[in-house]
């Protein structure tokens, strides 16, 4: 992430590595994704002002929807 436009090129776009780091912070941090031998598990810790977070990831070649709601930790689920 650039804090200053030192090279005069910020209009060229975004940093893919920064976008990837943000995605990882949400998925592995706030959503609490753990990849285990028995499959993906989530242990969410959402900020109080977030209602929900949902992403789709691929696990062993299959898309899996991961979703967590701030209102109840037990509503966090992994769906094939």
Image: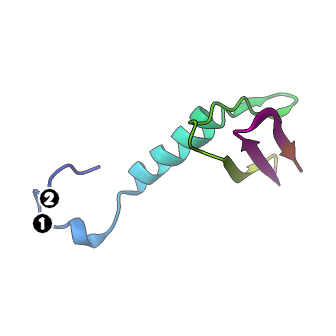
Callout 2: SS? loop
Q: Position of residue 44 (x, y in %)?
A: 69, 32
Q: Estimate how packed mark 1 is, as few (under 14), some (14 to 19) or many (20 or more) residues with alpha carbons within 10 Å.
A: few
Among the 4 quarters of the image, the one containing residue 34: top right
Report if the CB atoms under discs 2 and 1 are less than 8 Å apart. yes
Q: Tell me the residue that label 2 is attached to.
A: 5
Specify whether 67 is left or right of 77. Answer: left
| SS at badge 1 | loop
Give the image location of residue 67, x and y in percent: 76, 46
Image point (72%, 29%), residue name: 43
Q: Quadrant of residue 32?
A: top right
Say left or right for 63 vs 51: right
Task: Return the residue at label 1.
Answer: 8
Marks 2 and 1 sit apart, C-alpha to C-alpha, by 5 Å
Residue 71 painted magenta: yes
Label of residue 23 in the image: none
Magenta-drawn segment: 61-77
Residue at the spot 73% in from the left edge and 42% down from the top edge:
69
């Amino acid at each position: 992430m650039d804090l200053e436009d030192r090279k005069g090129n910020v209009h060229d776009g975004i940093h893919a590595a920064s976008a990837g780091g943000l995605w990882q912070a949400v998925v592995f941090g706030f959503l609490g994704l753990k990849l285990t031998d028995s499959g993906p598990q989530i242990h969410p810790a959402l900020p109080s002002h977030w209602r929900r977070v949902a992403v789709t990831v691929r696990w062993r070649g299959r898309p899996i929807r991961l979703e967590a709601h701030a209102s109840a930790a037990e509503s966090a689920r992994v769906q094939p």
